[in-house]
Image (spheres, helix red, strand yellow):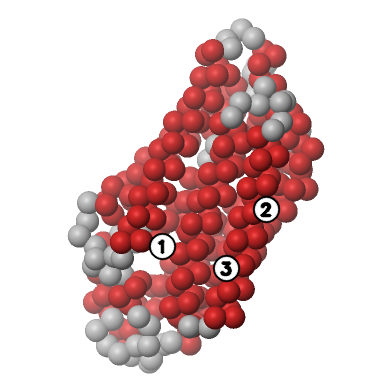
Amino acid sequence: MGAYDTTIGALLIGVITNTYLFGLVSYQYGHYLNSNYNDHLWVRLMVMALFSVDIVHTASVIYLFWRYGVENFMQPEAILNNYWPYPFTALVTVCTAYLVQSFFTFRIWKLTYNRVLTGFVFAVASGTFVLGVGTSIKVWNLELISDLMLYRPLYASWLSMEVTIDAIIAAIMVYKLSQSKTGFKNSDHAINRLIRLTVQSGACAGVFAIFGPDLLFHKSENALLCNVWNTNQPRLFEYFHGHPLIPEQSTRSAIQQDCREFTSIDFRFWASS
């Protein structure tokens, strides 16, 4: 094994993978923004904001590799430095998750019109956001990247909270959607589609958040090796969260076609066009 396989090499793999994932989510965003969906303006602005953050983060990750592998070439001690794109990745993950969770919280409101339940979900999501921002600030102030291991409990707590709020949102939405079935084939089929999107969003994003602290902090003592995960974490969160947020035209059309029968769900909000 080479001297830089688990440091610069790991970061290079992370950058390449992140760029590939950026291409996938860019296709989603491009297809959505060039469509004629009749979504609310604030929804379209949220999607544009997420896309903008994606662009900035992907550029910052490439710059991070430039600093380690090009600008400091033949300076092995440079791999200990904590350059700003590293903590910026955590901050991007926090903001991305909070934006999408806030959108899902509004969905819960549209499904239940329960102020207490919606307020509880929003409070947990906001608390998770504050914890994540605090973690990002702590990491940002570090001089050496190896000192990241000092914040294992804080980092793991933040990601655990991300899993918790995703599970809460998914459970509420699945339960409410299941209650809304009418017995008519088409409308029930549309509800099943929405349930699948909900589970995909909450479960898949939660799995990656669980693996994050375990693989990074309990299996590896090399902080830079964590970049294989860290550089891709925002894309993974966004891909699984964003797919239900901006479903493809085929999914929207199928839901609308199934929604011609009576149901208590406001499908215009879920699949407007």
Q: Secondary structure at mark 2?
A: helix
Q: Secondary structure at mark 1?
A: helix
Can residue 57 be seen at all in this image of the molecule?
A: yes
User: Relative to residue 23, is residue 68 drawn left or right?
Assistant: right
Q: Are marks 3 and 2 in contact (CB under 8 Å)?
A: no
User: Relative to residue 191, is residue 39 drawn left or right?
Assistant: left
Q: CA distance from mark 1 to mark 2?
A: 25 Å
* Of 30 and 94, the residue lying toward us: 94
Amino acid identity at mark 3: Phe
- Of the numbered discs in the image, which one, if any, rests on residue 122? 3
Of all residues shown, which one is farthest toward the bottom? 183
N-terminal of the two: label 1 or label 3? 3
Give the x, y percent position of residue 211.
65, 50
Please tell me whether mark 1 or mark 3 is closer to you in this view. Answer: 3
Residue 75 drawn above or below residue 264: above
* Of 39 and 256, the residue lying toward us: 39
Q: Secondary structure at mark 3?
A: helix
Residue identifier under label 1: 244
Q: State the quadrant of the C terminus.
A: bottom left
Residue at the spot 44% in from the left edge and 43% down from the top edge:
53
N-terminal of the two: label 3 or label 2? 3
Residue identifier under label 2: 131
Amino acid identity at mark 1: Pro
Give residue 126's quadrant in the image: bottom right
Give the x, y percent position of residue 29.
33, 49
Give residue 167's quadrant in the image: bottom right
Residue 76 drawn above or below residue 26: above
Q: CA distance from mark 1 to mark 3?
A: 19 Å
* Of 121 and 192, the residue lying toward us: 121
Can residue 25 be seen at all in this image of the molecule?
A: no
